Image (cartoon, grey):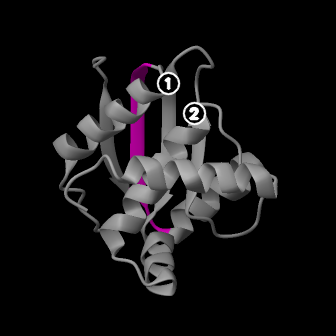
Amino acid sequence: MTSANINFFTEDTSFIFANDELVSTWLTKVADHEKQEIRNLNYVFCSDEYLLGINQKYLNHDYYTDIISFPLSSEVIEGDIFISVDRVTENASKNKVNFENELYRVMVHGLLHFLGYKDKTQEESITMRTLENKYLELITPI
């Protein structure tokens, strides 16, 4: 397994991420399965309003989203992934899954983007969802 530098931060939320070691090990396994290396990956858990501001400022999108990722390299996995805890909470409720499961799904979704997977077309979305489900099975406990 490659050595990875994975960090977890919060902005504009009282959310506390408590599974650093478990999730870091899991995300490293995902990258290893894809034959990639995580050099430096930062997850920033934030509020809807914080992520909306990023969406407006950097992407010129004026809507809420659950995740925005900013890769810094195409050679290795390096960059920042911002996740709205508010969106994850709402999506978990809407999809009738627990919060932790939805959070992990969104986290691996961001990593999959860094690995080169897209989700713009229906076919790409199906591939992305299949991979999310595959890699969710690697984390314990869910």
Task: Kindly check if marks 1 and 2 are in contact, taking CB atoms under 8 A apart as contact.
Answer: yes
Which corner quadrant holds the N terminus?
Answer: top left
In this rendering, the answer to whether 122 lies above or below 13 is above
Give the residue type at disc 1.
Answer: Ile
Q: Residue at x 46, y 67 (%)?
A: 47
Residue closest to the eye, 84 or 28: 28
* Disc 1: which residue: 77
For mark 2, give the secondary structure. Answer: helix
Give the residue type at disc 2.
Answer: Phe
Q: Residue at x 31, y 17 (%)?
A: 2
Q: Residue at x 79, y 58 (%)?
A: 122
In this rendering, the answer to whether 74 lies above or below 82 is above
Q: Is residue 42 magenta?
A: yes
Q: Which residues are magenta?
A: 37-47
Q: Is residue 85 left or right of residue 52?
A: left
* Disc 2: which residue: 114
Q: Quadrant of residue 16?
A: bottom left
Which corner quadrant holds the C terminus?
Answer: bottom left
- Asked whether residue 47 is in view, the answer is yes
Q: Position of residue 29 (x, y in %)?
A: 33, 32
Number of disc labels: 2
Q: Is residue 3 magenta?
A: no
Q: Residues within 10 Å of mark 1 (few under 14, many from 20)?
A: many
Instruction: Give the prevailing secondary structure in the magenta stretch.
Output: strand
Q: Residues within 10 Å of mark 2 (few under 14, many from 20)?
A: many
Q: Position of residue 98 (x, y in %)?
A: 33, 76
- Asked whether residue 82 is in view, the answer is no
For mark 1, give the secondary structure. Answer: strand
Q: Position of residue 51 (x, y in %)?
A: 56, 60
Q: Is residue 63 left or right of residue 21?
A: right
